[in-house]
Amino acid sequence: MKNLSINGDRLWQSLMEMAKIGATAKGGCCRLTLTDLDKEARDLFVGWCKEIGCTVTVDQMGNIFARRSGTDNSLPPVMTGSHLDTQPTGGKFDGVFGVLAGLEVMRTLHENKVETKAPIEITVWTNEEGSRFAPAMMGSGVVAGRFTLEEILAKTDIDGKVFGEELSRIGYAGDLPAAQRPIGAFFEAHIEQGPYLEAEEKTIGVVNKGQGQRWYDVTITGRESHAGTTPMPLRHDALAAAAKLINEVERIANAHQPHACGTVGFVQVHPNSRNTIPGQIKMSVDLRNPDDAILSQMDEELKAFCERLPALASVEVDLDPIWYYAPVIFAEDCINAVREGAKKHGYSHMDIFAGAGHDACYIADFAPASMIFIPCENGISHNETENVVPADVVAGCNVLLSAMLERANA
Ligand code: HGY
Ligand code: MN
Ligand code: MN
């Protein structure tokens, strides 16, 4: 097969077109899962896929599958994909790069009339971010069997909106069972979202592992009372207790360097009035580590602290572990296909592990999977200034094309 290359300008145009949906004043995207903006992005993607003759199906979780036949359709598809939902202060490229790089691969095969042995599919996974509805990676998680469809459809957001009802409302509650299916290989192209490729001046990240995560919902209950008449020793200040917990999360992460991460990203204060001592706090805790034993150690330390906190701060503490997945090792065949793709194009590359969660981490449960990273400016993501170099977008997509063809014609 002649040396195929993708059309970088067309890919960049599609990225900029998609970025208009939920565009923010600071140049990012706010396109939360199952909102009208998510629907708009999905509809745009589906239209683009149909333009090049893909057949499009949707499963019970709203995951979208755009399929291009191979010469032997009895073979399991070689798949790529990512997500279109964003964080509230999201960028233009997190998730979207992987979806539209997959589309560009399809467009390139289509216009060059290239036939592959195995069919090719692009997937858009529902609610990868886990921001509006927690936890994350729900679409791929239900397909992998990590979550049941029932538990996920019943999830509610901060306003009490129900996941299943929102999915139906945007018209993406499909009939296809959201369950494991034969997949020949799954590749996810994604921005690194961290600083290492840029620091090492490498164009391609050959992702060999995804770190593990533990998410918790914490409720701290004290007692509302007057900010001016309640002596300090008599207070049950839920927010002061939360401050101790936030410091402990930071201590735990710093105690397990070089890789541990600990974050409190969500805090809800009740009644949130400047002259009433806060009576209740709802907050999140996010712990991560590429080593499962260390992640367990971090979990133990968090639990021990939450045992001690009631006496320390005269409050009640409920620590609810809502999500856990162990570090994921990707498939050697897929990792090698990515590395060979980088070498073939002469792109500098390095092995790297994924600090963020990705749908590929769940697909790896039942299919050979790996990921392709490209650098992002200053390693910044989940931020409206998230940015990439067009040449790196081209490189990542060329490596994706190469890896998918290698697996589809293996
Ligand atoms: O949280 C994560 O790692 C991903 O961005 N959902
Ligand atoms: Mn992502
Ligand atoms: Mn993200």
Image (cartoon, grey):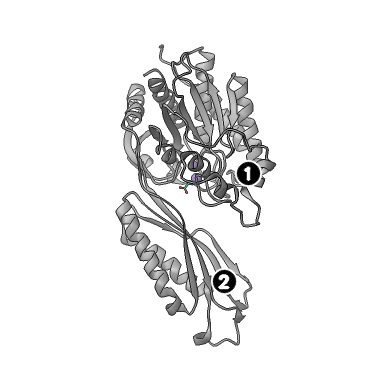
Instruction: Tell me if 344 is positioned left or right of 40 in this view.
Output: left
Question: Residue 254 at x, y = what percent?
Answer: 34, 61
User: Between residues 51 and 146, which one lies in front from this camera angle?
Assistant: 146
Residue at position x 63%, y 44% in the image: 34
User: Between residues 283 and 292, which one lies in front from this camera angle?
Assistant: 292
Other residues around mark 2 within 10 Å, as few (<14) / some (14–19) / many (≥20): many
Q: Which residue is mark 1?
A: 34
Question: Residue 242 at x, y = what percent?
Answer: 49, 70
Mark 1 C-beta closer than 8 Å to ligand 1: no
Residue 269, compared with residue 201, is above or below; it is below
Question: Residue 220 at x, y = what percent?
Answer: 52, 70
Residue 243, compared with residue 24, is above or below; it is below
Question: Residue 346 at x, y = what percent?
Answer: 34, 24
Residue at position x 46%, y 28% in the image: 79
Asked if the residue under mark 2 is in contact with the one under mark 1, i.e. CB atoms within 8 Å, the reply is no
The tag earlier along the polypeptide, 1 or 2, is 1
Residue at position x 57%, y 86% in the image: 230
- Quarter in which the N terminus is drawn: top left
- State the separation of the CA atoms marked 1 and 2: 29 Å
Q: Which residue is mark 2?
A: 280
User: Between residues 249 and 13, which one lies in front from this camera angle?
Assistant: 249
